[in-house]
Image: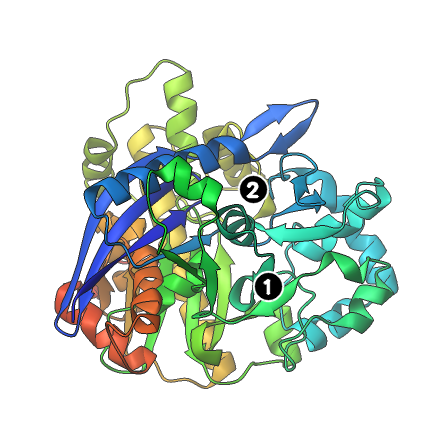
Amino acid sequence: MIGTVAAVDLGATSGRVMLGRVGPNELSLDPVLRFPNTPRHGDGEMHWDIDELYRSTVAGLRAALRKQPSIRSIGIDAWAIDYALLKDGQSLGAPFHYRDDRSLAAVGEVHNRVSAAELYARNGLQHLSFSTLFQLTADRDAGRLQAADRLLLIPDLFAFWLTGRQVAERTNASTTGLLGLHSREWDVELIDDLDLPLSLFPELVDAGTPLGNLRPSVVEMLGGGERVTVTAVGSHDTASAVVAVPSTRDDFAYISCGTWGLVGVELDAPVLTEASRFANFTNEGGVDGRVRYLHNVMGLWLLSECVRTWEEEGAVVHLPTLLVRAAQVATPVPLFDANDPTFLAPGDMPARIATWCMDHGTAAPESPAEFVRSIIESLAHAFAEAVATATELSGKSVSVIHLVGGGSLNELLCQVTADRSGLPVLAGPVEATAIGNILIQARVQGLVTGSLESLRAVVAAAFPPIAYQPRVASVQP
């Protein structure tokens, strides 16, 4: 039996709606609509333009139904951590962007109530100053929670708008810092310790849970879809991406590379040692109860912000050409700390990289090609270090790195990651997140069966990765 489902995949800089045709021996993608995800700036704040993002999503689903009226299911994944506040089902304003700095002041307040060590023991998460629990504390202090009766993470918000059902899917809920690491339920005691209203937090569901049919008003907007079910998938985009790692073995590390680089291994149980906490590794929920043990690296945000700055200065930037020139840079370029929080906010990225280099006693890159090569080398170095640390802390043996997502198209990044890690890098699929989203829906629909390993074998057959072997001699000091 072969059927079609639709994936809504919302990334931090762009979104897409894709059709997936799936059967026992078939897996194919049909991109329907791609659209930008551009934040809004005003009054010193940074928000998501959530209404425009939803309008684009609806347009994509409308086009998908025109193209394939027999769609069985829709699944939604998005970035983690950020949320909307609602009252009686109505949004109380555009969600804050995680790059807004309002939560910085809340970090100390949270740690005065619950120590960093206790938080790690309870939620297993790395410290990120913009995590949901810090954002909620900032909202509590600003009085924003008083009028709210519900909190919905971004993919859950879209699912609510489509179906009318308010839930929290567990892989994304695990990134909030407020989900019990072992119980996988809301940590009521921690929520109380932080003086947050328990009533904000919706029912939890697992990936693979049918959420219901489309609302009549949505069916009218889409011009069809009366029988379409919305299905909870691994709604954290990295959770869906890891589902689609095309591995036929279990001794792999993964890098889900786009705006961020999520680097880690898949485990059956969390790692909660002090060494793990100090290394700032996180234990996030995966599909089918797996643990995504990983570290966040700044990712291709560094490159895209440089390009944006150069274009604002009047340069015409053709990224493929720039990457070729970067690969041709023969002299050593500086390595900088790709995890330094100074690179988190939008702004003049080349200037910040140059300042970091000068502050650390090294010459800054000069030409755009040198900046790009420095970014690629620094990211690859951070990726390789994260893989090595993940294996050391978890005890998991790794013989290969799967690099999925948009970064898998960057041949220089893939090769330098292989060089610096000393491990083969298997690149692709590019649309891993959408594929993982589609496969979980397809399994619910009975179009495919089996474990994650079975699903990954389907991916490997449909989207064979490109291999990059390490060239030890090419690694720069």
Give the crowd class for mark 2: few <14, some 14-19, many >=20 residues within 10 Å: some
Label annotation for residue 99: none
Residue bearing the label numbered 1: 173
320 over 140 or under it: above or below:
above
The quadrant where residue 331 appears: top left
Which residue lies most toward the top here?
314
Callout 2: helix, strand or loop?
loop
Residue 168 appears left or right of 296:
right
Name the spot of residue 19 as percent of width and height, x first. 25, 51
Tag nearer the camera, 1 or 2: 1
Q: Which residue is mark 2?
A: 344
Question: Given the image, on which type of amino acid does mark 2 rest?
Answer: Leu
Q: What is the quadrant of the N terminus in the image?
A: bottom left
In this view, the residue in front, 470 or 431, is: 431
Number of numbered discs visible in the structure rendering? 2
Q: CA distance from mark 1 to mark 2?
A: 23 Å
Disc 1, SS: helix
